Amino acid sequence: DAGITQSPRHKVTETGTPVTLRCHQTENHRYMYWYRQDPGHGLRLIHYSYGVKDTDKGEVSDGYSVSRSKTEDFLLTLESATSSQTSVYFCAISFTGTPNNEQFFGPGTRLTVL
Amino acid sequence: AQKITQTQPGMFVQEKEAVTLDCTYDTSDPSYGLFWYKQPSSGEMIFLIYQGSYDQQNATEGRYSLNFQKARKSANLVISASQLGDSAMYFCAMRVTGNQFYFGTGTSLTVIP
């Protein structure tokens, strides 16, 4: 268990409203990631972080921003939600202390934008 | 360009038989890692197996093995003695420089009793 939680787990919102998803980890891992999962696309990286206040864009970052003010929390914000942002969002951490550096995932957040 | 390709949207296998899920990758990084994840219908992502680009031997984890062919840039997952609980989506992923990960589009495996 990598100690990753996501909140909320489910959210329904309306187009144009701001939305913030939270990822929390308990084990001080340096790397954290936000992905979205859509049918036919697999998982696509939105943003990732390699330390407090150190973040970078992934392949589908338009319309999303992130913040990491503490090691344990990585926030994903949709400034003005659109229907195309309806998706399942996964947070992940990477175990950089092992040879594999494998990723472990949170349980996911299902977001519906009406 | 970094890319992972899974060309099998869906696969069927008889219970107790072996099945191979295909994965090809493209990267110019000399050092990279290849992963397989399982996603059951409940939605969680479960790490299965890892292969490093410099590993000489194919990785194995219980009933899972990774058939790594570096020259062909392929990293196929082999599941032996399939069980009903193996029915799930399977994702191939690649880690490259900067600890960035790229995922394929997934293969849906159905095990038939």
Image (tube, grey):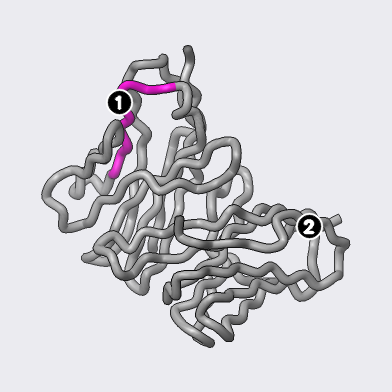
Q: Quadrant of residue A73?
A: bottom right
Secondary structure beneath label 2: strand
The residue carrying mark 2 is A11
Q: Amino acid at mark 1?
A: Ser
Q: Position of residue B34 (x, y in %)?
A: 31, 53
Does residue B108 show up magenta in the picture? no
Q: Is residue B16 left or right of residue A67?
A: left
Q: Quadrant of the N terminus of chain B?
A: bottom left
Secondary structure beneath label 1: loop
Q: Position of residue A98 (x, y in %)?
A: 28, 64
Q: Classify mark 1: residues with Cα within 10 Å, few (<14), some (14-19) or many (20+).
A: some
Q: Position of residue A46 (x, y in %)?
A: 57, 67
Q: Is residue A41 left or right of residue A84?
A: left
Rendered view: B54 above or below B65:
below
The residue nearer to you, when weighing A114 against A50, is: A50
The residue carrying mark 1 is B80
Question: Measuring 42% from the left and 19% from the top, which residue is drawn there?
Answer: B13
Q: Amino acid at mark 2?
A: Lys
